[in-house]
Structures are given as C-alpha cells and as structure tokens.
Image (spheres, helix red, strand yellow):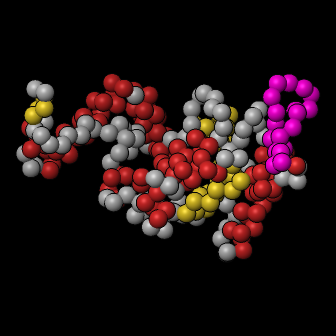
Amino acid sequence: MRFHVLTLFPEMIDSGLNTSITGRAIKNGLIELDSVNIRDYTKEKHGKVDDYPYGGGAGMVMQAEPVYLSYKAVEDKIIKEGRKKPRVIYTTPQGRVFNQEIARELSEEEDLVFLCGHYEGIDERALELVVTDNISIGDYVLTGGELPAMVMIDAISRLVKGVLNNDDSAKYESFTDNLLEYPQYTRPEQYMGKSVPKVLLSGDHKKVDKWRYEESLKRTKQRRPDLLEEKNEDSTVTE
C-alpha cells in the first residue's frame, strides 16, 4: 500500500512515520510513504504558496495552483504505473470523523493521497478539483493537517497484512465489533498487591474468551456507552 502526503512540511511526515511499526513496515516494503512538498510546485519566489483571502479576513489562504499541481504529479505517476486514480483525503475538522470502520475501508486501497492544509485553509477551487474525502480526527482545530494525516496512516497501516507481527492483533483491538479492548496483563502474577485474574492462568481458552468478551462489554458500558448505542442501531438496521 502506498501513502502520498501533500504537505508544506515533508520532514514532519518522514520523521513521524519512519519509526516504530510504520517505520518497520516501510523498511520491509509492506507500505510505501511518499512525502510531497507542495512548495516545489509554486511559481512564486522563495517558495511562497499563500496569499490574502478575497473578501478580507484574518490570516492567509493556501493558493490553488501549487496544491493542484502537486496532486497532479502524484496522480500522473500512479496512472503511469498502471494503478487506478487514488482517493484524496483532505484532513479537515469539517469532514466525517475518522474511526476504525473508515480505517478498514481505506486499508483496501492501493494508493491514498492525504492533503494537509495550513493557515486559514486551502483555496476552495483546489479542493473541488482533487479531494474525494473530507475526514476529521475530532472536533478541535490543529495548526496543520500533518498530525491528522499521520494518525490516520498509522491506524490504516496496522490493518495492512503483514504490518503487525501477529495479524490477529488487529482483529481483537479496541473498536472491534464496537467494543473496547479487554484488560491485558503480563508477568509478574502479583504486583503492588494486585493479582492477575485467575481465569487468565487457567489454560482454558473458552473461559478466557468468555472473560475477555465480558470485560470488553463492561469496559465499553463504563467508558464509551455511545459505542453500544451505535452497535444496537446497526443491528436494528440489518435485521
């Protein structure tokens, strides 16, 4: 799987994702990361890519042309290599909120392009020309789109076959079947007066699975009851 990130700060993307699990996946060729500097596609002096907004107002707006040209360079390369036109994700608080279901959906793509905005945003004409998906990571505002892009790439990468040492890990993490993950324990059996639950030491896999499901359900009820409401709504729709 190939991730292409259109950004004013490619070094931020490279340093953030070339570590840990994603870094290992890149090194092993399981995913590819292409950080594209939007400034390379401006015709303005000194790499200028922003200007004052029409109609007035505070701040600056990223110009349409360098954004469009940087995307076209990526698209042309993808098409030339025989792959389909990519989905383009604009990281914006105006988009649908990213979740595990969206991560699974996007993990099926060959190529994904992430467009990272800055300042007061991007000229709307560029967005209309290139963007296919507007996605947010939450109802708050960040300095730029790089952190949301990295969050999504990390979550999506974990679902690509072979990225995790144990592919079963992705099946049983939080938000699987709209439940939070059950508590985890490791050695020693006793720590600061607290013990590992006896069922986990029993060797009875059926009992362990039952305990884990019950704990996931309990934790979800306590911490994220909204997930259970969504689960019930989905069940009603499909029945």
Spot occupied by residue 122 in the image (x, y as percentages of width and height): 78, 40
Query: In the image, what residue occupies the spot 42% across and 36% down?
Result: 231
Which image quadrant is residue 218 in?
top left
Q: Nearer the viewer, residue 118 or 81?
A: 118
Q: Would you say 156 lies left or right of 144 here?
A: left
* Foreground of the two, 35 or 231: 35
Is 124 located above or below residue 56 in the figure?
below
Q: Is residue 157 visible?
A: no
Residue 165 magenta-highlighted: no
Front in this rendered view, residue 137 or 84: 137
Q: Quarter of the image for the C terminus: give it.
A: top left
Q: Position of residue 185 (x, y in %)?
A: 20, 40
The answer to whether residue 154 is above or below residue 58 is below
Question: Considering the image in quadrants, where does the N terminus appear?
Answer: bottom right
How many labels, in total?
Answer: 0
Where does the image place residue 123, in percent across and percent down from the top left?
83, 41
Q: Quadrant of residue 77?
A: bottom right
Q: Is residue 205 left or right of residue 78?
A: left
Which stretch is magenta? 46-63
Residue shown at 18% from the left, 43% from the top:
186
Question: Where residue 227 sits: x, y (%)?
Answer: 42, 32
Q: Is residue 81 above or below residue 115?
A: below
Residue pushed farthest right? Answer: 55
Residue 20 seen anywhere in this rendered image of the structure? yes
Which residue appears at 61% of the width and 37% of the height? 136
Magenta stretch, main secondary structure class: loop
